[in-house]
Image (cartoon, rainbow, N blue to C red):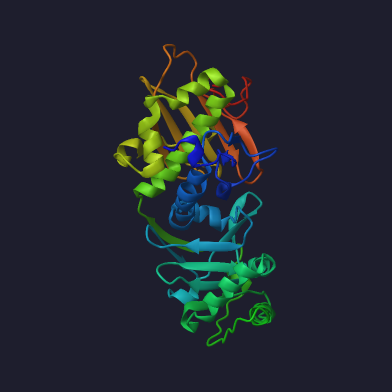
Amino acid sequence: MKIENETTFKRREHVIPQFLGTFEPDNPSMKGDLVCDDCNSKVFSKLEINFVADSYEGLYSQMWDITNSGMVRIKGRNLDMQTVTGFGDKFPDEFFPFLKYEGEKPVVKLRPQLKVRNYVDGYQVFTYDSLQKIKAGGKGKFNRFKKRLRMMPETDMALFGGSNDGSTEEINRFIKLLNDLGISYNEKVRKYASNKNIEGKSIQINYKCTIDRDLMRVIAKIVFNYFIYCTEQDGSYYKNFLYEANFDKLRNFIYNGSGDWKEIVKFSKQKAILDIEGDGSIRILAHTIQFTLKGDLIMAKISLFGQWIYEVEIGKYPLSTQTKFGCGHMFDPFSKSIHPIGPDKYSLNRLTDSGFGWFKI
């Protein structure tokens, strides 16, 4: 914890990190007097970058290109992913499978991309458009990128492109862009498979993900952000509860990783959070957070992209009354919309107060 003159509080902390989507008319965010700029930039940014590159939910975020950056980072320590395409199972033969909607079904979209092995672990992917953005983004950033690629062994770089007619124009255009940027790419082998056999088809993605403390700190941070925002919406009286010792266990775990994280964040046995998902056989590709009371503890359930459901212990409920406590929302990163959820049968169409707050069930 820091005293006021040790840091600044100029930036806002988003309830849902921007790598998971932005929402209209505005991303819900906490006022700048609750999360200091040092925590935002030095602690949380590093955690979130690692989460994107090395978690299953982070993989989903990149496959959908939620940030529209066209860049991918797979760290490969906790997350091990292979794309089985029929080209082979080695580094140069596995392109990164971006996703798109075809009707209501998610399918693979083959985007022209440069794949570069990282020095330590994993790899990065740059689409054609992302390289143009790097070039336009400033001399310093581009020079660092160019220096890195100039030092890269040819065996640690691979280009992917596609066409339905066997044309090599897309690959040649990418090579020309690299050459124009001062990066030499000497092609050794060229393999071919028709786009008709790839795009829009099922491609097997093998993955395994090991859950660790830092990944769960991000899950806990998103939950606590949501709790803070809901508390803010109930006014200054409720906001005072945020500073009580009831929430120190979760707060300290998020800030410095202290405590038994397996007791703070657990896999939920619940099959779904949204009623419309029924028995869990159908999952909505959205982020869902809901907190309720479990005895005298405030508990939260969270799912990102409709994948695993985590249960997070927020802390002891600080009020004597427990009448109608709880809140829940679904954040849809594709429509950029936010929907309140509740315990009623039609949880996305409920008629009660649709705002944020402790008592918005």
- In depth, the one of 6 and 72 nearer the eye is 6
Name the quadrant containing residue 259. Answer: top left
On the image, the x and y values in percent for residue 162 come to 63, 74
Point 41% across, 41% down: residue: 255
Left or right of 69, for residue 262: left
Point 49% across, 22% down: residue: 240
Left or right of 271, for residue 178: right
Q: On screen, 292 above or below 269? A: above
Point 68% across, 39% down: residue: 24
Image quarter where the N terminus lies is top left
On the question of residue 202 being in view, the answer is no
Point 37% across, 26% down: residue: 245
Q: On screen, 83 above or below 32? A: below
On the image, the x and y values in percent for residue 336 come to 65, 42
Q: Residue furthest front?
A: 5
Q: On screen, 212 above or below 220? A: below
Q: Residue furthest left?
A: 260
- In depth, the one of 70 and 253 nearer the eye is 253
On the image, the x and y values in percent for residue 74 come to 47, 62
Instruction: Please give the count of numbered marks on the rendered protein.
Output: 0
Left or right of 168, for residue 121: left
On the image, the x and y values in percent for residue 29 come to 59, 36
Image quarter where the C terminus lies is top right
- In depth, the one of 214 and 113 nearer the eye is 214
- In depth, the one of 48 and 187 nearer the eye is 48
On the question of residue 250 being in view, the answer is yes
